[in-house]
Image (cartoon, rainbow, N blue to C red):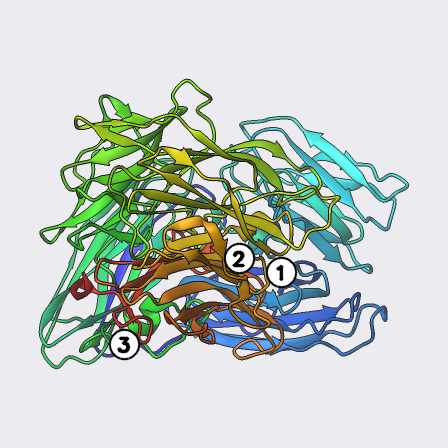
Amino acid sequence: MFPIRRQSIVITLMFCFSLAVVAAGQGSDELDGGIDRIGGVGGVYFLAEPGELIVEVERRDLNRSGKNAQLRAILLGPDRRVIQDVTIPDDGEARGSGIGPATRRRLATMVRRKGVYALNITVAQDRYGDEIAWGFRTNCSSYLIETSRGHRDRRHEEPIVLHADDRPGDVCFLPRAGSFDIEINGLKVADPLTVYDADNGPVASLLVDAAGKAQYRFEADPQRGTKPWRLHLPVARATIQIDGVTRWDAADPYPNLCCWTPDRQSFFPLLPYRWMLTPYSKTLYARDAAEVEATFEVHNNSPERQTFDLSVEFDDSPSKVELSDRQVTLDSGRSKTVTVRVDIEAGARPTECYLRATPARLPEFSTYSTLTIEPGDPPADRPLKMPITLEPYRHENAQFGYAPNYPTENQPFFDLDGRPSVMAGGSCRSLREGTWIAGEMTIEGRRFSPTSTRIAYDAAGDMYLLGRSGSDLALLRSTDDGRTFSAHLVAPGKGGGGSLDIEQFTGHNLPSGPPPVVRYTRTEKDPNLIWRSLYDLELFVPEKIDGRIEIGEPMMLSRKCIGLSAHSGIPSTIVSKDGKVHVAWGEATDPAVKVPGVPTYVATYDRKSKKLSESALVGYGPPANDVHNSPSITIDSRGYIHVIVGTHGRPFLYTRSKQPNDATRGWTEPVPVGENLRQTYIGLVCGADDTLHLVYRLWRYGESPHPSSYHATLAYQCKPVDGPWQPPRLLVVAAFSEYSIFYHRLNIDRRGRLFLSYDYWSTFWFYRNDHRGKRRALIMSPDGGENWKLVGPKDW
């Protein structure tokens, strides 16, 4: 594993569970466990004892498509530090030539401390693992496979695929207590399949039909317990679906986790105690003599109430180590934060601390997290060398010592005095006099849940949110700095469905009264085009009358709105200036009619005349009928309205109103913001000097650090007030190739500083499942996009 430094602490958090199968230790160097010729991607978890851990990875090309499908294998420690990162290249055989020869790579490490190790398997240009068969051999006696492909835009399923034509095989799995089906396709022999229970007694025989299919329904049985069943196949060539294992319902205890093994003896209880101690590693910095405080979360993922005994171990201890809790009892699904405090002496060298869990019921099961304490100031305090190139399992904390003491769950918004607020933990949290306070979301006996991450302000400084209580949608208002709110229902009793959006500050807009609100109500879902729906788009312009908020009647903007793509970029829908409200949206079109893209419209409401203008067509965002192509709108200090026309993997288009604060008197010809750019998800604001700032996802192909495939980046462009769009600059680079997204949100404060919140999301379920919670980070630029840094306590 890793060498233990002289000044080290070992902190043990121990847990247990009822399943009696645990690690018995590694063998010498004989690789007795494992499997080969399985499809899909994902990886393996190993409960490894001290000694040498060996894992030999094998790949065979199926040569179905002719793609250059390079396999990547990463061996990880319990703290998710990368031990080895290797690739196995494509065999280079022609398309249709059949399964190729086996190619192997050996990975090994010396386990110094028992814990849950991991093997991550991905394939370039093959995120579903359709082009390869892979497998492994190991000397570890306890292991569990997790089949985890890249995501698809549909219900998540992870069928178990076996490619061995010349031998029998077993699939051992935890059966659902409720009723479940097993469905098997692609069988090459007609012999029946047998399912054995936890005591190895036969419980069902699955007959194979002439098409090579078998199916069986098991009725509910709450006595099935927590030990694995075994499905035996006379020939291990099949595609297997098991309810509760490869596809899930809401009531399943372990959704999205397809865990199984070919050997019942290797099965160990990972699922009930997934994410029991997180984060797996944390890096903190300390100057001179200091008390360093680190928090970790103990989580009970089992269906039973559990007690965790917490203890501290160390080799050479600093002057003082304290653990906040010696014992934690948690109900099912609950978590608790524990704190480790370490006194660091002046001049101390880097210190590594190991947090370990030891059980009350089953001491043999154990794993740990690592706390690293570095001397000096963290790199996160300094300007960053862009881009931030994320590495597998090494993100902002590991690379820069980023340890925010503020809520990072969503993007910050700033009041008229420049103080931040963030939607987090089901409430609005605001920084007031050095403390983050949570707003009270129970209003007159009704609990309201936020329905948007946006926070708005009016010219009087009142704060506004969007919320829901039951079926009622509401505009929430605070006049006391976000401590308490009043609720104002939007169109109560008139079909309370749909979703709301609200005007946010984008640089120069500030509504004189309560912020305008739009409502999206879906009226049609296209069964043939996944990204095409029709929505009614309505505008509400609330007013303050004698201190009260009157929402007013809705004004129909469109009955063909395609919706709002709000999870990334969160494009601005509304801007206001001098009593005029400007709204931008895209529309669905008749699929039978060829159009250049999603038509983008802008309309204006005049608060003084109380009139709504005709809609102005300002451009088309390709491809047509794609909700990703939501436009974004902003306004500059002179009143000119700027719109970025959304696209999906194409260059964005930019247009500007010909007259200030007027959407009806013409628009400039839409022009691309760059050539040959694969852009999606607009984040747009306008700086104090009227420079436009744009952040979006940008695809890159065949370039470092993923030259064998494509990968996602988070990119930035700007347009000076009288100049062209500047070339893209990369801000963040994905840790893995293939599909990724950043869930980014770009904001600007009242001083013109840019704030960018993002949460890297890889298509590969194995990587995402391994981490509990979000990885969201916040960077800012104090100088209009020239330099960027991770936000620290001094940046508020």
Instruction: Single out the residue that lies furthest toward the top.
Output: 493
The kind of residue tagged 2 is Phe
Residue 377 at x, y = what percent? Answer: 19, 76
Does 677 sit above or below residue 467? below
Q: Is residue 101 visible?
A: yes
Mark-to-mark CA distance, 3 and 2: 32 Å
Q: Are marks 3 and 1 in contact (CB under 8 Å)?
A: no
Q: Are marks 2 and 1 in contact (CB under 8 Å)?
A: yes
Mark-to-mark CA distance, 2 and 1: 8 Å
Tag on residue 91?
A: none
Does 180 sit above or below residue 232? above
Which image quarter is the C terminus in? bottom left
Instruction: Single out the residue that lies furthest toward the right.
Output: 210
| Label 2 SS | helix
Q: Earlier in the sequence, mark 2 or mark 1?
A: 1
Q: Earlier in the sequence, mark 3 or mark 2?
A: 3
- Nearest to the observer: residue 454 or residue 36: 454
Tag on residue 41?
A: 1
| Label 3 SS | loop
Residue 547 at x, y = what percent? Answer: 17, 28
Q: How crowded is the residue under tag 3: few (<14 C-alpha within 10 Å), some, or many (20+)?
A: some
Q: Is residue 762 left or right of residue 591?
A: left
Residue bearing mark 3: 383
Residue 51 at x, y = what percent? Answer: 44, 72
Residue bearing mark 2: 766
Q: Earlier in the sequence, mark 3 or mark 1?
A: 1
